[in-house]
Image (cartoon, grey):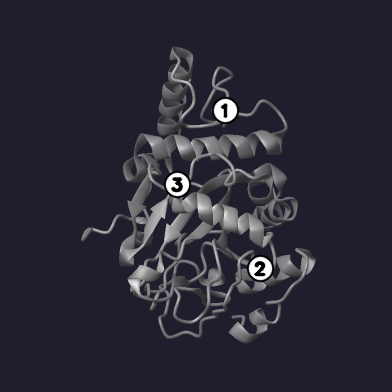
Amino acid sequence: MASAYACGVLDRFSPIDDETLTTLHSCGFAVLRGLLPPALVVSLASHYSSHEGMPGADLLNGRREWLPPYAMPFSDDRILHHPALTALAAAYLGGDEHLDLDALTVTTAPGGTGRQPMHRDVLEGPAAVLTLHLPLGDLPSPSAGALALQPGTHGSAGRECEEHTDAYETSLRAGDAIVYDARICHCGTANARPRASGERPVLYLLWKRRDASLTGYLPHEVNLRFGRQGFHTVLDYREAFRERRDGHAGQLAADCDASDGPIRNNRSSGSSSSVRRRALREQRWLTSSPLAGLSPYLQRDPEQ
């Protein structure tokens, strides 16, 4: 198993290259310093802060997950279609023809939120989901709810995570990010700052293999956790990503037919044709994927 020190060696400013991919395979994660311009992160944070109306769902351990609308700055090409990031995800998950977007979300941990237990987002199997963790502001470690990862544990998927195994933590500045295999044992650490200090928002971008069946964003799960608005928000992002990747008028091939073009904004026209397309793709997507169990860390908190 890779050590926390060995994986931390690449915690520096460097381009996304073959060494990044090697580190990802060995450690299960890689730290990407200076990935995005700080000004873009400030814009993301500003637009998130007025998140009234965004569909959201409670997570365990006091955290909450939100689905930003398919709109700028969240749909900025530097995030959704970042060429080096997309190439890295494709290489890690098996090639361009296998790559899809799973979801784009923002997760918050208010001041006073406790540490999560170590867990995996994908419990077992081959590499199927790759996650980008992008704090919407400086995220010091310890004390502010930074991400902790146990290097190499993506290779032991299917086994319980051990709380006392060495974990890797690092402070992140606005524009820094961590990319990790969703099978790795990880957790959000405690946010010891006062509740009045804010929510500690982190943007997550998740790529998946097109044939992946066990993710936290299957149709019935999205509909259950976020409602119809969230359901269509996830589809908006997926269709836009697929369109750019496949280079055509783009729809989710398994979910929509030629009459169902991508809907660019989930608050778009309420015309009868638009409503019909939305209803049709909803029906197709809900009937195209099997029901699957959620990782317990993607479920609603029963106490909230």
Quadrant where the C terminus is found in the figure:
bottom left
Residue 12: image x %, image y %?
A: 71, 76
Secondary structure at numbered mark 1:
loop
Residue 128 appears anywhere in the view: no
Q: CA distance from mark 2 to mark 3?
A: 27 Å
Q: Which marked residue is nearer to the observer: mark 1 or mark 3?
A: 3
Q: Is residue 77 left or right of residue 158?
A: right
Quadrant where the N terminus is found in the figure:
bottom right
Residue 271: image x %, image y %?
A: 45, 15
Q: CA distance from mark 1 to mark 3?
A: 18 Å
> What residue do we see at 41% from left, 26% from top?
283
Residue 37 appears anywhere in the view: yes
> What residue do we see at 67% from left, 58% from top?
92
On screen, 272 above or below 6?
above
Residue 107: image x %, image y %?
A: 44, 58
Which circle's residue, 2 or 3, is located before the other in the chain? Answer: 2
Which circle's residue, 1 or 3, is located before the other in the chain? Answer: 3
Q: Are marks 2 and 3 in contact (CB under 8 Å)?
A: no
Report which residue position mark 3 lands on.
Answer: 67
Towards the viewer: 149 or 13: 13
Image mark for residue 262: 1
Q: Amino acid at mark 1?
A: Pro
Report which residue position mark 2 lands on.
Answer: 24
Q: Amino acid at mark 2?
A: Leu
> What residue do we see at 68% from left, 70% from top?
33
Q: Amino acid at mark 3?
A: Leu
Q: CA distance from mark 1 to mark 2?
A: 33 Å
Q: Residues within 10 Å of mark 2 (few under 14, many from 20)?
A: many
Secondary structure at numbered mark 2:
helix
Residue 257: image x %, image y %?
A: 55, 21
